[in-house]
């Protein structure tokens, strides 16, 4: 698999919106679920959202109702639409795809920084 590439991060004020993108050919062909994670400075990486191969979705409680995960197979891209952003959403956001037998091999992008100011 090719390493995914994230984009779309930036700096916004509280209440603003951003849409993150994660691009890799695996988005359209994978038989494994895909995820977004984030890591704030000085904190452990935390799971944000997942997208199943049937396009089922799951969200961390902290982002539920504000973030939406989706994908466009024709563009080999997965998205994370982030609305009503809060300062506590400030973090490096990374997408993860998986491969190998049993989907046991993770593939990580370099990440994209999101900064929310109050």
Image (spheres, rainbow, N blue to C red):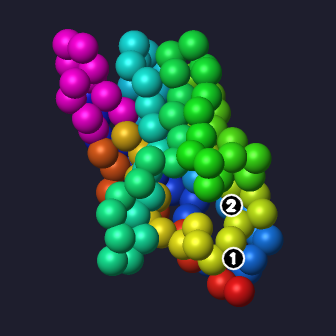
Compute the Cα span from label 1 to label 2: 8 Å
Give above or below for 28 relative to 106: above
Start-end of magenta stretch: 97-107
Marks 1 and 2, the one that precedes in the sequence: 1
Question: Mark 2 — residue?
Answer: 18
Quadrant showing the C terminus: bottom right
Question: Mark 1 — residue?
Answer: 12
Q: Residues within 10 Å of mark 1 (few under 14, many from 20)?
A: some
In this rendering, would 111 be left or right of 106? right
For the point 40% across and 64% down, the residue is 39
Residue 65 located within the stretch drawn in magenta: no
Quadrant showing the N terminus: top left
Marks 2 and 1: in contact by CB < 8 Å?
yes
Give above or below for 64 relative to 32: below
In this rendering, would 111 be left or right of 63? left
For the point 44% across and 31% down, the residue is 34
């Amino acid at each position: 698999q090719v390493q995914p590439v994230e984009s779309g991060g930036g700096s916004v004020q509280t209440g603003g919106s951003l849409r993150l993108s994660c691009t890799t050919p695996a988005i359209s062909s994978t038989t494994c679920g895909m995820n977004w994670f984030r890591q704030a400075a000085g904190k452990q990486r935390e799971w944000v959202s997942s997208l199943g191969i049937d396009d089922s979705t799951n969200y961390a409680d902290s982002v539920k109702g504000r973030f939406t995960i989706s994908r466009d197979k024709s563009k080999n891209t997965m998205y994370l639409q982030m609305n009503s952003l809060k300062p506590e959403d400030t973090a490096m956001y990374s997408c993860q795809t998986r491969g190998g037998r049993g989907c046991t091999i993770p593939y990580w992008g370099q990440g994209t920084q999101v900064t929310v100011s109050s």
